Image: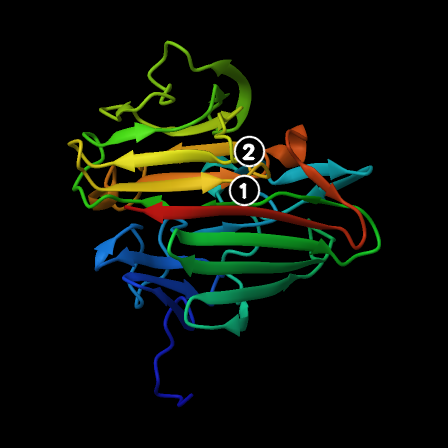
Amino acid sequence: MSASTPVAPSGDQFELRHGEQRVVVVEVGGGLRTYTLAGQEVLDGYAEDQMCPSARGEVLIPWPNRLRDGTYEFDGDRLQVALSEPGKHNAIHGLVRWVNWNATEHSESHVAMAQTLSAQDGYPFSLALRIDYRLDVDGLTVETTATNLGGSDCPYGAGAHPYLTVGTDSIDRCMLKSPGAVRMLTDEQAIPTSSEPVTGTEYDFRARRPIGSTQLDTGYGEPDRDPDGRARVVLQAPGEDGRRVTLWMDERYPYLMLFTGDSLPDRARRRRALGVEPMTCAPNAFQSGEGLHRLKPGESFTGTWGIQPG
């Protein structure tokens, strides 16, 4: 590359196509930048000349969501990671959001992104990471695998941060159907302190209904699953024939965050799309242990989620 050639803030771009579907996966963070169907946005992503804003499409490893004060204990050691959310005194969304990933395989409808998360201050463990993005007639499938490369056990969790859109200026009149029998109650640091059933509250979207004015930055557990074992979130534009998009997640993802974007720094993007975040563990799992996975040396963990437009 010439010294005069500008480098995109998200690095190299890896395009996938299948029929009228188009996806762009990026080098920086290994996440999703765009997803369109017949030219219509499925994800509220970002432009090639932009730095990824508000975690759009990012990969959240080795923990999703927040870690209180960036500190935790593991096997008797007290560990401290950097406070990447200093305003709330938390570490947020893991350690791989801004590192470069390598495309080890790339075809018209598939790309495999790989990265080695090396031992570092606060996380003295090594992980081999691989994410397979595949497009087919059913939409996008995302398979994430982590393997413990070290000689001792390590804590692990994963998540993803796509923002779903059905082309509306606001999601207020959109219909939402989402699993989750309980919601997490949080403190001033947005850390879960307890949970409660959603029955009878404005946070219950198990039956399809409009989002309305409900503000969501809300974690859910105990998701209802269909006979195929998948839990599904369905966002639909107003009207019986309104555009729809579905995010599904397999049994490895027993937790979910919904985010209506009311606190986004870009006011124009608030409530324009719905952040739907599949998570293998609960927020703050490095402290609470809720859903946290302990990977033994050489052990791998694989989870799969996907998006189906239309």
Residue 139 sits above or below residue 269 on the image: below
Give percent across and percent down for residue 1: 42, 88
Residue 88 relative to residue 264: left or right: right
Task: Please tell me which residue lies in front, 176 or 277.
Answer: 176
Q: Residues within 10 Å of mark 1 (few under 14, many from 20)?
A: many
Residue at left offset 25%, top offset 39%: 270
What residue would you read off at disc 2?
283
Residue 258 sits above or below residue 200 on the image: below
Residue 230 relative to residue 44: left or right: right
Give percent across and percent down for residue 140: 41, 54
Residue at left offset 35%, top offset 64%: 18
Tell me, yes or no, whether the two marked residues, 2 and 1, touch with CB atoms within 8 Å: yes
Task: Name the residue type under label 2.
Answer: Pro
Q: Secondary structure at mark 1?
A: loop
Give the Cα separation between the discs numbered 2 and 1. 6 Å
What residue would you read off at disc 1?
64
Residue 179 falls in image quadrant? top left
